[in-house]
Image (tube, rainbow, N blue to C red):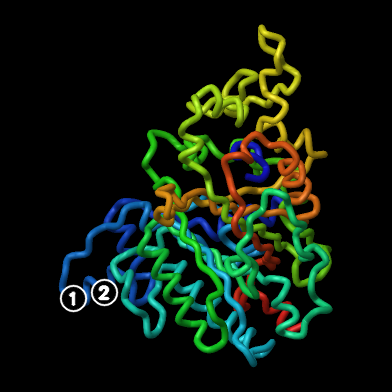
């Protein structure tokens, strides 16, 4: 897993404005819940009232809303949700730039309504009684999209195919794609509702190439907020870049004067399905697992000492003279200080797709990494991991994709408009 299961940023003014517009936190009171629902014409509580029922106040998990419009798209720096769907579409034969623009217009309108807790026209009614539950929808373009729409002159150089890695066992049918959607919400029904609504909107213009479903811990499941824990039991994402870092925007987002112009304030998402060989992993002793990672399993602290957030001491040795963090430990190999500062913002989901014929769980990580340039973020880190990561014995990279995710849509715009109407 790239940039560490633990170790894997926007102009501050723009970021503050974006977040303040996006994060509209509700309260548990009936008055607040009613206010939010009534503000969303045809919303859940409006529906209940029309049926003559007494409205029930939504919890803060249900009422929390994130705005669709902004300098950057939602679903990148927003808090990780409990449920996620990743989908790639290919444009249908005969569909080109005009049809793609119409599709993105429809998708953007629907995403805006759903994220606000509103009910779109001809809605299925799947989530009539639910609030927005921190729903986000994020859109991206694959390299092949530019061929299909005859926009090859606008294809970013950073969207060049990722190199092959020796540990890859990729399924091409579940990799790449013309268009990409990332859906996240803190309620499973809300997430599925968005998935279904957007899939229906694709009509005859685009066909699903692949879809993956993921999950994380639900809000309130732990006594205090903490870094995510993956299916290997490891705390995952400790060394993610922080929005407070001076170089956060430089590492994660295309600058406001970047090229091509339609990608300004956008980012590049590397998406990989990484199956964990959990039966093999679980047979390892705790000490062996911690040595492979370079961190304690209980709290994520580095084996060189301290707490989870203590910087790695890569030179520290134990009483036996051996390095506290082994030379092939995942934390050491993926650390920015050993990769020329290369870093990316990891925002993954865990997944479980049943069991394989041999009885092993088909489970692992839906790895999503954001960066301003994959050649400076994902690629150098993965190359190093490919050469000698102790964790590589226990994982398999089975699918891979790279998408250009443009900046956010302004009021009255749809995502990708600056590209498709250029």
Quadrant of the drawing holding the N terminus: top right
Residue 387 has which mark? none
Q: Is residue 160 left or right of residue 390?
A: right
Residue 326 position, x and y percent, is 68, 24
Please indicate, yes or no, whether residue 372 appears anywhere in the rendered image. no
**Element under disc 1:** loop
**Element under disc 2:** helix
Q: Which residue is mark 1?
A: 51
Q: Residue at x 68, y 63 (%)?
A: 402
Q: Are marks 2 and 1 in contact (CB under 8 Å)?
A: yes
In the picture as drawn, the residue positioned furthest to the front comes out as 358
- In the image, 39 versus 419, the foreground residue is 419
Q: Is residue 254 left or right of residue 119?
A: right
User: Residue 223's quadrant in the figure?
Assistant: top left
Residue 398 position, x and y percent, is 59, 56
| Dot 2 alpha-carbon crowd within 10 angstroms: few under 14, some 14 to 19, many 20 or more | some
- Measured in 3D between alpha carbons, the distance from the residue under mark 2 to the one under mark 1, in whole angstroms, is 6 Å
- In the image, 54 versus 188, the foreground residue is 188
Residue 299 position, x and y percent, is 50, 27
Q: Residue at x 60, y 31 (%)?
A: 293
Q: Is residue 69 above or below residue 396?
A: below
In the picture as drawn, the residue positioned furthest to the top comes out as 319
User: Residue 221's quadrant in the figure?
Assistant: top left
User: Residue 191's quadrant in the figure?
Assistant: bottom left
């Amino acid at each position: 897993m790239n940039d560490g299961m633990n170790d894997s940023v926007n102009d501050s003014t723009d970021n503050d404005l974006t977040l303040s517009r996006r994060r509209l936190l509700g309260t548990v009171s009936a008055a607040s819940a009613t206010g939010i629902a009534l503000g969303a014409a045809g919303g859940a509580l409006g529906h209940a009232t029309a049926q003559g029922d007494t409205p029930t106040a939504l919890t803060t998990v249900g009422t929390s809303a994130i705005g669709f419009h902004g300098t950057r798209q939602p679903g990148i720096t927003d808090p990780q949700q409990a449920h996620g769907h990743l989908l790639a579409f290919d444009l249908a034969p005969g569909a080109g730039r005009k049809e793609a623009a119409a599709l993105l217009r429809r998708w953007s309108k629907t995403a805006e309504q759903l994220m606000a807790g509103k009910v779109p026209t001809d809605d299925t009614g799947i989530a009539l009684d639910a609030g927005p539950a921190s729903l986000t929808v994020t859109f991206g373009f694959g390299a092949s999209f530019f061929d299909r729409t005859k926009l090859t002159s606008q294809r970013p150089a950073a969207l060049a195919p990722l190199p092959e890695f020796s540990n890859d066992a990729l399924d091409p049918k579940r990799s790449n794609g013309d268009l990409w959607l990332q859906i996240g919400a803190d309620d499973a029904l809300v997430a599925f509702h968005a998935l279904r609504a957007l899939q229906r909107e694709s009509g005859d213009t685009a066909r699903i190439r692949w879809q993956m479903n993921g999950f994380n811990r639900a809000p309130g499941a732990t006594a205090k907020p903490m870094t995510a824990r993956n299916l290997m039991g490891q705390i995952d994402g400790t060394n993610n870049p922080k929005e407070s870092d001076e170089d956060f925007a430089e590492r994660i987002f295309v600058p406001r004067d970047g090229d091509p112009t339609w990608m300004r304030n956008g980012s590049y998402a590397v998406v990989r399905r990484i199956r964990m060989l959990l039966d093999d992993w679980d047979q390892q002793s705790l000490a062996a697992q911690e040595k492979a990672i370079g961190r304690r399993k209980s709290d994520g602290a580095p084996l060189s000492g301290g707490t989870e957030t203590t910087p790695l001491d890569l030179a520290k040795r134990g009483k036996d003279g051996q390095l506290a963090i082994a030379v092939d430990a995942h934390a050491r190999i993926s650390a920015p200080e050993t990769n020329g500062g290369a870093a990316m913002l990891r925002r993954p989901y865990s997944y479980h797709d049943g069991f394989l014929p041999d009885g092993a769980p088909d489970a692992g990580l839906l790895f999503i990494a954001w960066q301003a340039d994959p050649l400076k973020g994902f690629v150098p880190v993965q190359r190093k991991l490919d050469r000698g990561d102790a964790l590589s014995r226990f994982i398999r990279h089975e699918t891979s994709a790279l998408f250009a995710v443009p900046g956010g849509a302004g009021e009255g715009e749809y995502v990708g408009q600056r590209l498709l109407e250029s």
